[in-house]
Image: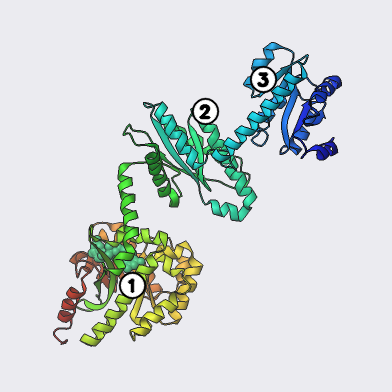
Amino acid sequence: MHELLERKKGLHRTILIVDDECIEREMLGAMLQDSYAVVYAENGAVALDIIRREKLTLSLIILDLHMPELDGYTLLKIIRSDSELRRIPVIVLTSEREAEVTVLQLGAADFITKPYDAPDVVRARVGRSIELAEDSIIIHETERDELTGLFNKAFFFEYGKLLDLQNRNMPMDAIVLDINRFHIINELYGRYFGDMVLKKVGFSVHDIVCRTGGLACRFNSNCFGIYLPHVPDLAEKLPQMLSVLCEGMGDCKITVRMGVYHDDGSGLDMEQRFERAALTCRKLRNSYTTCCEFYNAELHSRELYAERLMNDIDRALEERQFRVYFQPKYCICGSRPKLTSVEALIRWFHPEFGVIKPGEFISLFEDNGLIQKLDRYVWNVAAEHIRKWENDYGVCIPVSVNVSRVDAFNPLLGEILNEITGKNGLENGKLLLEITESAYTDNSQQIIDTVIGLRKQGYKIEMDDFGSGYSSLNMLTKLPIDALKLDMNFIRNICSNQKDRRLVGIMIEIARMLEVPAIAEGVETKEQMELLKELGCDIIQGYYLSRPLSEEDFEVLLKEELGGKAS
Ligand code: C2E
Ligand code: MG
Ligand code: MG
């Protein structure tokens, strides 16, 4: 049988006739064999084997309903529910009128009644079914995403708009769904598995719109869109939807995130709804805990603001909108606080938004790597100022700069810093490097290696925000650092909260054990300063002694500090 198929395909379109009655098969075959390659199967099971093997070359299946092994109804259902087989049209052979409606409902393209009509009628019905199926494949392929069979983006929006026009008062929700860390799934399990995941998610997405009505599409690699009639209790239904989506992937754990625009009657068009759903979905990118979020307007304006800041950074650097402020650190070991160094803190003087504090943009720029550019700018300014103050006032004031976690992973960090200190004629030890504690816990070994390398070159490392991360005591003893900066959240309440005071005491003890100074930041009152002094803290930084100052204001302070010694 298979050989016959091989010989004949390519010449004609191929038709599979499935009937347990030999005579019936032969009769039908005789009517068609001049125009088609005909293959035969004597029951549903044999037929299914052939269909699976020859799914790409079969143009039509003619199917009897009553057969041993696997009957025609069951085979028809199997074909119609299999995404790879359902493109092959099926004509059903019936002798009962009642069966006609049933088989058409099951997805048969047509039926031929037994005993057969005149051969011309049979050939006409066969020809028309093949033609219709082929036309619909052509339409289907331009509309559909090849892998999942869902609409592609262009058609999705086209049909969606049509749907909206036809149902003007029907509220519609938009959902954007993304598979978390899909590129890692591809890398770990291979492309074939990745495709399987996409197909599976695509199938579940299709299933959702089959049940709720609406449309689904694949926007791009691992991102899907669902446009469905408004579901008032969608929030309750989503967890169930999500769990179905992630089932059945074997050992590989798949998680997805969903951004939802819930129709509130504000009359946005389909594209605007999806923009908002996509924005909400993007926001979940770095969240480990939330997998689904509903759009809200406040979030939207925040995201737009963030987007705006990211677009503005190059121009801001060119136009010197970033300015470095300096906040003094004082040693409190002696009878009066003594200036020891300063911390460089960035400020953005934005032409439209005014002064923007780093809390609003640092993490944003860490996400997209722009922070490296910005930090390099700050380090340069810091080094230039150490040089300038030494030249102008004859004192060397070390400046600590913040080194973002992104910088700490850059293998060229040492070279970049050396270039900066080199061109300003500075010892490396005059640039103090603040690295936040949580960066150590992100990837401790790599950071530790970087820090060891930097210390070998003479840089001093201060662990910033100590207490906010999760350093284990074991890790702390291995850490190559030169100072511990206690997180200011612990300082805030030390005068009123006994527990915070104890904690700060313990952190100072840890610094002592590591034989490095403890620095407290965020010191706002005299009481806090005195308490810290009592607890054995070495250095403080905070509004009580000085706010972060512009270059000009810092020079005024420096002159006072030097007691008129400077020129
Ligand atoms: P940080 O390095 O822990 O800096 C200390 C922050 O505490 C600064 O906020 C400073 O202005 C603020 N501060 C100082 N004294 C007090 C006080 O007495 N009370 C209160 N409430 N706050 C005080 P700022 O300048 O807004 O910076 C926030 C964070 O942004 C910094 O925390 C640092 O992590 C980051 N940052 C600042 N500049 C840069 C930079 O150039 N590069 C990088 N990568 N990060 C930076
Ligand atoms: Mg800092
Ligand atoms: Mg800090």
Q: Nearer the viewer, mark 1 or mark 3?
A: 3
Q: Secondary structure at mark 1?
A: helix
Residue at mark 3 = 103
- Vertical comparison of 299 with 212: above or below: below
Q: At 54% across and 34% down in the image, what residue appears?
A: 206
What scheme was used to colour the molecule?
Answer: rainbow
Q: Is mark 2 within 8 Å of ligand 1?
A: no
Q: Which residue is mark 1?
A: 377
Residue type at mark 2? Arg
Disc nearer the start of the sequence (1/3) = 3
CA separation, marks 2 and 3?
A: 22 Å
Residue 106 visible in the current orientation: yes
Q: Residue at x 42, y 37 (%)?
A: 174
Lateral position of residue 3 relative to residue 402, left or right = right
Residue at image mark 2: 211
Asked if the beta carbon under badge 1 is closer than 8 A to the nearest atom of ligand 1, the reply is: no
Along the viewing direction, whichever of 490 and 432 lies nearer the viewer: 432
